[in-house]
Amino acid sequence: GESVGLHLPTLSVQEGDNSIINCAYSNSASDYFIWYKQESGKGPQFIIDIRSNMDKRQGQRVTVLLNKTVKHLSLQIAATQPGDSAVYFCAENPNSGYALNFGKGTSLLVTP
Amino acid sequence: EPEVTQTPSHQVTQMGQEVILRCVPISNHLYFYWYRQILGQKVEFLVSFYNNEISEKSEIFDDQFSVERPDGSNFTLKIRSTKLEDSAMYFCASTPGQGMYTEAFFGQGTRLTVV
């Protein structure tokens, strides 16, 4: 069936380095994508979103890239900080309603 | 900053019992959702609710589950005859309008433990 998945379950980076978290999706009809950050014991927190008519969107220290040709989404975090340590989920709206389809999550660990 | 609030933060119940999880969505939001996350797994959609009725539901949301907006502020998820496999974090979320391209705001979750 249609799915959203992540390439790597864990990612360890040094403080100050840039982080890249990847996500693959299989539903070519997906129209809207969101990255969420989830800290331990908390709910998902919105980071950045992108619509399918864009291939790049930038926020504060974060950039999302969308490659519709290969159905790939990435989240880039510049100058990663210890507070960025969390699980990151990509989520898609498959254009069939308002529900979000989440990927499995990548755990980002920032080491000093 | 407005937020989605959920109560209780942790609920322990015996198998076969009924539980009600409560949520107060952000006040001017129109769409409400329940998601669940089994430990170590991804967040899964259960149901969406708009204009006092279910607008979408997943295969997980079977007759064991029901949702209700009993008043102008609360949104509840009822799970009847709980099973061990219902143990999970349950997240409530809300979105401001009818537009599909709007972020969902999530609550902190209720950890349900069925024993």
Image (cartoon, grey):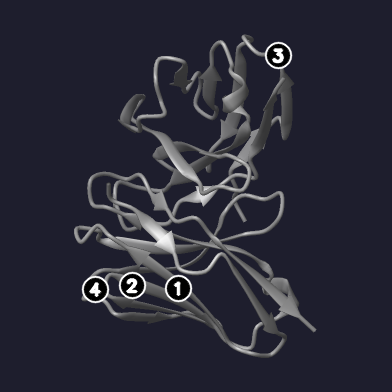
Identify the secondary structure beneath mark 2: strand
Q: Which residue is mark 3?
A: B14
Q: Which mark is residue A22?
A: 1
Quadrant placement of the C terminus of chain A: bottom right
Amino acid type shown at disc 2: His
Label count reads 4
Place residue B30 in its image quadrant.
top left
Q: Which residue is mark 4?
A: A68
Labels 4 & 1 near each other (Cβ < 8 A)? no
Q: Which residue is mark 2?
A: A72
Identify the secondary structure beneath mark 1: strand
Labels 2 & 1 near each other (Cβ < 8 A)? yes
Residue A3 to residue B79: above or below? below
Amino acid type shown at disc 3: Gln
Amino acid type shown at disc 1: Asn
Identify the secondary structure beneath mark 4: loop
Residue B47 to residue B103: above or below? above
Q: Residue shown at 62%/17% (left/top)?
A: B19
